Amino acid sequence: MTLPVIFFIIALAVVIALVWLHHAQVIAGRLPERRPLPALTVLQAALARSAETGRPVHLSPGASTIGAGEGQRATTAELLAGLNVVRQASEQAAASGSIIKISSADAVAHLALRGAARQAYRVTGQPQAFDPRQIELWAHADPMAYAAAVAAQYRREPLEASAMIGAFGQEVLLATETGVTEQLPQILGSTHPSALAVMAVTTPHLLIGEEIFAAEAHLSSAPGPQARLRTHDTLRVAIIWLLIFAFGYGLIRAALGWPALPGW
């Protein structure tokens, strides 16, 4: 067994152990204080209003593709973050009688969205309220075509709000500018600087970078999302400390004659 495989197995075991530990802490009521994400409060309020106004809330996990190939901007991680947001929003919609319209830009993501929405309605005890026509495929592996389809939907149908959280690029401006013209509340989120730059000028309700991965835990009180968020935070802190240690070691090793770290 090679050294990289051993490191991978050890890292996997540590991650699993952290998830179990944090899951037990959440069940025991030991929840850390989190900073609020106002954009998600706007989304929840829009879903609540939708039950009264009858106008749908548009949900999108981004112009993402599962298993993006070399040279493609979209990442599976961002798509999964968007899927988690859609699932939690679907649960609230099912519980409150809100109307949702879910769109995607990938055929595989479309099937995943249908499964997530169906499961959300089952979990809330409203399986008969699920309508597969709520989930639509507006493009496939073409972010520009998808953004144009979103813009057309904004002009065609009155919406209560639109939440697009996932992988986007500069083409998202085509949709968000139309949303501004239609005076549509927009909740946007991405990790790409090019997308965030145009999102920031079209809406104040923004999820920046890693906030899209924390959104699931903010929308749900279930132990699973809370445990995953705490595990992410723990691993992030551990990696930061490792980077600081490696940087400090590199500064002093030459002066003290210490050997280089493996892989340097």
Image (cartoon, rainbow, N blue to C red):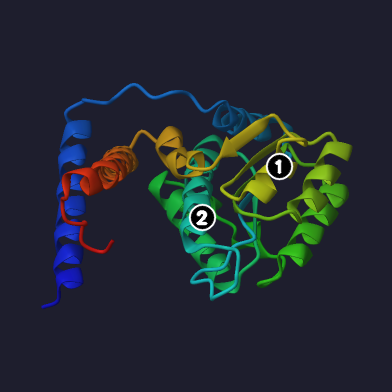
Q: Position of residue 161 (x, y in %)?
A: 71, 38
Callout 2 environment at 10 Å: few (<14), some (14 to 19), or many (20+)?
Answer: many
Please name the amino acid that badge 1 sits on. Ala
- The residue positioned 22% from the left and 44% from the top of the image is 255
Q: Quadrant of the C terminus?
A: bottom left
Q: Position of residue 185 (x, y in %)?
A: 74, 34
Q: What residue sits 42% from the left and 52% below the top?
A: 122
Are dots 1 and 2 in contact, CB under 8 Å?
no
Which residue: 85% across, 55% down? Answer: 152
The type of residue carrying mark 2 is: Glu
Q: Residue furthest left?
A: 1
Q: Which mark is residue 240?
A: none
Q: Which quadrant of the figure has residue 29? A: top left
Q: Is residue 128 visible?
A: yes
User: What secondary structure is marked by label 2?
Assistant: helix
Where, by quadrant of the figure, is residue 134 drawn? bottom right
Indicate the position of residue 239 as horizontal and vertical percent values: 29, 45
Q: Earlier in the sequence, mark 1 or mark 2?
A: 2
Q: Look at mark 2 in the image and give the residue it sits on.
A: 78
* Res 196 quadrant in image: top right
Res 227 visible: no
Q: Residue furthest bottom?
A: 1
**Residue at the image point whose x is 79% and y is 36% from the top:** 184
Where residue 197 is drawn, which disc sits there?
1
Quote the CA–CA distance across marks 1 and 2. 17 Å
* Quarter in which the N terminus is drawn: bottom left
Closest to the observer, 47 or 9 = 9
Query: 189 or 260: nearer the eye?
Result: 260
| Whole-percent x, y for residue 86 in the image | 53, 49
Q: Is the residue marked by circle 1 packed among few (<14), some (14-19), or many (20+) residues within 10 Å? A: few
- Mark 1: which secondary structure? helix
